[in-house]
Image (spheres, rainbow, N blue to C red):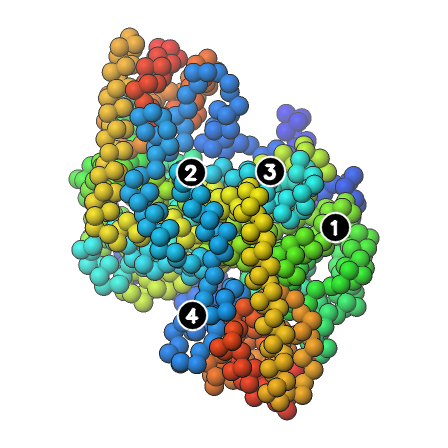
Amino acid sequence: MFSALVLLSSALLVTAFPVEAASKTSIDTIWNGVEMGPPDAILGIAQNFRASTDERKVNVCVGAYRDETGQPWVLPSVRAAEGKMIENNENKEYLPIDGDAAFVEKALKFAYGADAPLERIAGVQTLSGTGACRIGGKFLAEFFSGNKIYLPVPTWGNHHKIFGECGLDVQTYRYYDRSTNRLDLDGMLADIKDAPDGSIILLHACAHNPTGCDPNSSQWRALMDLIKEKGHLIFFDSAYQGFASGDAEADAQALRNVMKEGLPMLLAQSFAKNFGLYGERCGTLSVVCKDAETKDILMSQLKNIIRPMYSSPPKHGSSIVKTVLSDDALTGQYYKECTQMADRIQSMRTRLVEAIKEAGSTHDWSHVTEQIGMFAYTGMSAEMCDQLTDEYAIYLTRDGRISIAGLNDNNLKYVAEAVHAVTDGKSITSN
Amino acid sequence: MAMNALSRCSNQLRRLPLTRLRQMSTSPWSFFEMAPLDPIIGLNEQFQKDDYPSKVIVGVGAYRDEKGKPFVLPSVRKAEKILAEGGLDMEYAGIAGEPRFVDLALEFAYGEDSAALKEGRIQGVQALSGTGGLRVFGEMMKKHGSTTLYLPNPSWGNHKNIFTNSGLEVKNYRYYDADNSSLDFEGMVHDIKSMPAGSIVLLHACAHNPTGMDPTLEQWKELSSVIKEQDLVTFFDCAYQGFASGDASKDAAAIRMFVEDGHLISMVQSFSKNFGLYGQRVGALSVVGRDAEEAKKVVSQMKTVIRPMYSNPPRHGARLVTTILEDPQLTAEFREECKGMADRINTMRGALKDSLESAGSTRDWSHITDQIGMFAYSGLSNEQVLEMRAKHHVYCTGDGRISMAGVTSDNVDYIANAIHDVAK
């Protein structure tokens, strides 16, 4: 019996992974069968952009803000916070497993509101949004195995990978209708209704990535009522708070309404975009509980997931956010800077559509005008996107998503004319 | 017994799919149990809650200066100012981190003169310090058919946790002879010879945690040839380079020997202790391949694990290391400061041993000065450790591991008396 098991498990190993038979030395065997890993879809395109020597090249693929000269922008309030941190001689000690408590408190209030019931919200510091989704997903996989997680179509590409890695059963729900370039509310509600009771539903808190298409308030209401009826568990991903409308409070309305409604929920929060802290990996994962006791228990379980993954989170980004949000002047300054970013993007959005029309396009681009956040989900096909890249050195993702943050006075007309050129006479509603 | 059965039962129950979640009154979390405290970090939490005025903690491996205060290396402070003046952006690093940092990190460990490094056969990624690198390694190996990883007995408390969570089966090889407070080299060699083909064997590059007992160079040489005869995946955990002897190059001797001897090792480096960058989570995970192509393939697989875990690593700490290692002057200062930390610890080792003898202890405490690195593996039993906590409010981990970095001339006598009291 035992030897049969051993044979069976070796057979499984052999079929699943092409490991060579054991030989005398490790040199010839260790890494045989290792294939080159697939390039990441989004980051791979960014890499191609960097490698390109075409003078005309434009980067509108990665969702990182650029100023009007096309340069990365570190918020002045962030710089000021860094200066303060140096003045205060901050040490480099380990943070606790769950992160900087003062930071987490500020972060949760930023999301849930100044009057948030923190005593019953289990919150941990995470490595930005990815880390939060991974910790949250692992947590759910451990304690809700057998339950499905439903992701919108489309969603950020990495969502599928993250939740799949966690071992969750990943399903999808209709979200965006490319034939109308608008929210497919009926499809969305139908699929969420079909999902077994108590499923996990991933919702983008605002500025849906990649479509920029958010439900309006009556649509959110319909969604909430259905989710309540089905007893689903909402997992919010909030990566653009403050960035969507320019008003951080307004952008948090959907998630705050769910909390006020008393529904159980998880929230993955990222400070990559709104604080411009991309590479410093700053975020939180939180779970709204019914009482403080439950919160304590959940905290212990979340810590158990973090400790064997990376022990404790990196402190530079969280110190910055904490420093800004603990200082009234810096906080005021920060909100203005965030609005500034959102306003520039909004202005580029409007001007992009105008410029495409000026170039001669007769398509209906109103969906782009109505979309919100960092991206324009144009409706262009993969072939059109390839043409944009190959012929015009414009680098975007192949789903037709343009990062508006990458547009400025220098490249707007060029991009608009190229978009017109590749879409002229073709459909942007059947891709 | 009945309670255990009940909690097992509730564990089973909670694996069933939930059918309907109602509102907050029927919470989805109602069957949750409190998870156990981490044995090392949980100690801090306990210590914080203790309000005994003379309490002492010698738990977490974090360096303290002679006043018992956290220590930021002066070279790090200088690097920080340079960075602040440089006005660098905060864009995403690549999934593998900044190439410049990775290059410098690998040079630091493998040596500038490493032929393998110059040939491009050694490639790596930035990692979330040691833990993060270990986890990425474990997940990657699991995906590539590995099933079993061997740790020395004992090893760092979090190792088993990390690799079990990676889906590997964790076993032990003999390492420490507790009766004689020495390395059980024969046992180690025997166990390594018995490991099945394809097993991963984890070695501590220097300053073994928690015992502080390292093989001698001759013993490393023998280990190298023993392992050469096997078909094993040799993996080094290097968390104390520079901290063990005070000489970073010397501390890397085992790693460099293995590479020189042709082993295709992989390794995780932590910059938490030697650069004092604990909370910045700076490390590197690397692999030595037969050629550059092969090493790059393995790195691409590391990236596949990283992307759905945290996308890309934090920049600040890596930039500090880069700033220092790019500058010969700062590097020289750093090496001095690191040596300074190692020296203070060694002084404290002597002081603790002397103080124990002065307290009247007749036990043999020579292992305290024989051991190397941050920890003294005291030999105290778990019961004695708990008694020391309760009675004297001296906190160390349950395995009797004392973080020497937390010992100062102010508290050494107090600690010695406490140890003597429970151990006599």
Q: Position of residue B65 (x, y in %)?
A: 32, 29
Q: Where is residue A289 in the image (x, y as percent from the top left)?
A: 70, 40
Residue carrying label 2: A88
Callout 2: SS: loop
- Badge 2: chain ID: A
Is residue B305 visible to the viewer in this orientation of the structure? no
Q: What residue type is labelled 3?
A: Met
Q: What residue type is labelled 4?
A: Gln
Spatial separation of the CA atoms under disc 2 and disc 4: 38 Å
Question: Few, some or many C-alpha atoms within 10 Å of disc 1 (few <14, some 14-19, many ≥20)?
Answer: some
Q: What residue type is labelled 2?
A: Asn
Spatial separation of the CA atoms under disc 4 and disc 1: 39 Å
Spatial separation of the CA atoms under disc 2 and disc 3: 30 Å
Spatial separation of the CA atoms under disc 3 and disc 1: 21 Å
Spatial separation of the CA atoms under disc 2 and disc 1: 39 Å
Residue at screen point 27% across, 33% down: B341
Residue at screen point 44% across, 25% down: B398
In primary-sequence order, the first of circles 2 and 1 is: 2
Residue carrying label 4: A47
Of labels 2 and 1, the one closer to you:
2
Residue at screen point 46% across, 16% down: B53
Residue carrying label 1: A258
Q: What residue type is labelled 1?
A: Val
Spatial separation of the CA atoms under disc 3 and disc 4: 38 Å
Callout 3: SS: helix
Of labels 2 and 3, the one closer to you:
2
Residue furthest to the front in view is: A329
Residue carrying label 3: A299
Quick check: A210 left or right of A66?
right
